[in-house]
Image: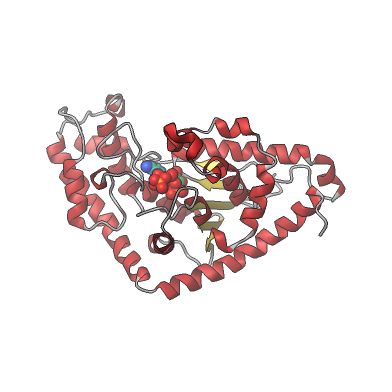
């Protein structure tokens, strides 16, 4: 039996307009976890600035992520919604973890390699250190479960490596300060469901991303019904009819992506979707997918717009969340300071 009570932490960067990938890979899955776990959902603005953000856009995007959490059904009275930069301990523990993590670990991170591309000498130091700040976000709350999309799996593994190394490096201080030897938990990634990696609608080799230059590649959470239907109609597919079995989707990235999106939106499985649409072509499937997407996303977009029209209310919720998050974070940091040997 673990000494850690089940606690969920996850975050989204306010780095642009939220996508269907963010919704299906993360936000939609945040909601049911509230029934079984204490949940902490963060707008990770410190992560957003690892690449340049216009200050006005950053603020608006921060409101948008908070509005999406609320509109999707996260309850800020029972759980916590807050903004990362309002809880100073994230940066503090992030620094300590910069001193625990190894350069070689960071150099292996595929997301850094993808984002830096050929420009690795000219990206921010923050982008390189991103995974150790992410480890701090999670471990500050001793979170046990982290719902994320597939792209974050490697960062979660690194979080576990950092937790383990901290527990080992400071083992005798952890003991002499009276704490359990497993001071930080080994958080579990929660990567589940049919849409853990939603692909670009234009290029099956890429994931759908806020920062994609092509708006036709991406369904945004605030897109209206016409835009959603148009993007699905133009989405890359192939000339074959849909297969009757999931195995038949192998090697058909775009087809598998659209089937996965349908399944995730309608809370079924890809096989259920193929039971219904197997043998039919995209001319029949795409309009059905557009209908499901609009039916699911339109009410959430409407609720997001309602929140976005009341920025004061969002600020109130974030400030209250930050206060509650700070209480947990400052308890952890008091312990960590003693463990590390800082004079308090
Ligand atoms: N395409 C996706 N499919 C499934 N899950 C996804 N997520 C992001 N894209 C997809 C999940 O959304 C959560 C928040 O991600 P983030 O905003 O913190 O960072 P990201 O993964 O880098 O998202 P983007 O949209 O690609 O942002 P940009 O373009 O700014 O870098 C995570 O749980 C992520 O897995």
Residue most toward the right?
176
Residue most toward the front?
122
Q: Quadrant of residue 106?
A: top right
| Ligand 1 position by quadrant | top left
Q: Position of residue 262 (x, y in %)?
A: 28, 43
Q: Quadrant of residue 192?
A: top left
Give left or right: position of 58 versus 93: left
Q: Position of residue 291 (x, y in %)?
A: 20, 51
Q: Position of residue 97 (x, y in %)?
A: 67, 44
Viewer-side residue, 15 vs 116: 116
Q: Quadrant of the N terminus?
A: top right
Q: Is residue 246 above or below residue 97?
A: above
Q: Is residue 289 above or below residue 316?
A: above
Number of residue marks:
0
Q: Position of residue 219 (x, y in %)?
A: 28, 49
Q: Quadrant of the C terminus?
A: bottom right
The residue shown at (50%, 73%) is 316
Q: Is residue 316 above or below residue 216?
A: below
Viewer-side residue, 120 vs 231: 120
């Amino acid at each position: 039996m673990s000494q850690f009570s089940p606690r969920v932490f996850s975050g989204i960067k306010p780095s642009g307009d939220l996508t269907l990938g963010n919704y299906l890979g993360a936000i939609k899955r945040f909601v049911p976890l509230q029934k079984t776990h204490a949940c902490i959902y963060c707008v990770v603005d410190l992560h957003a600035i690892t690449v340049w953000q216009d200050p006005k856009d950053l603020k608006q995007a921060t409101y948008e992520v908070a509005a999406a959490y609320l509109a999707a059904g996260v309850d800020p009275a029972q759980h916590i919604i807050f903004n990362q930069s309002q809880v100073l301990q994230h940066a503090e523990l992030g620094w300590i973890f910069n001193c625990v993590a190894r350069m070689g670990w960071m150099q292996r991170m595929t997301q850094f390699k993808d984002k830096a591309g050929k420009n690795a000498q000219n990206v921010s130091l923050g982008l390189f250190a991103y995974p150790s700040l992410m480890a701090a976000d999670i471990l500050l709350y001793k979170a046990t479960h982290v719902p994320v999309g597939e792209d974050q799996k490697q960062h979660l593994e690194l979080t576990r490596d950092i937790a383990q190394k901290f527990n080992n490096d400071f083992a005798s201080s952890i003991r002499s300060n009276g704490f359990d030897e497993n001071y930080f938990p080994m958080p579990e990634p929660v990567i589940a469901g049919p849409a853990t990696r939603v692909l670009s609608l234009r290029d099956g080799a890429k994931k759908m991303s806020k920062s994609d230059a092509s708006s036709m590649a991406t369904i945004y959470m605030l897109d209206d019904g016409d835009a959603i239907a148009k993007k699905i109609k133009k989405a890359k597919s192939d000339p074959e009819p849909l297969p009757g079995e999931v195995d038949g989707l192998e090697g058909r990235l775009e087809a598998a992506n659209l089937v996965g999106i349908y399944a995730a939106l309608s809370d079924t499985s890809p096989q259920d979707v193929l039971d219904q649409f197997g043998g039919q072509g995209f001319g029949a499937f795409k309009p059905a997918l557009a209908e499901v997407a609009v039916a699911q996303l339109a009410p959430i977009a409407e609720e997001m717009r309602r929140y976005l029209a009341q920025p004061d209310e969002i600020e109130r919720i974030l400030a209250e969340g930050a206060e509650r998050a700070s209480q947990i974070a400052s308890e952890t940091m008091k312990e960590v300071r003693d463990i590390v040997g800082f004079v308090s």
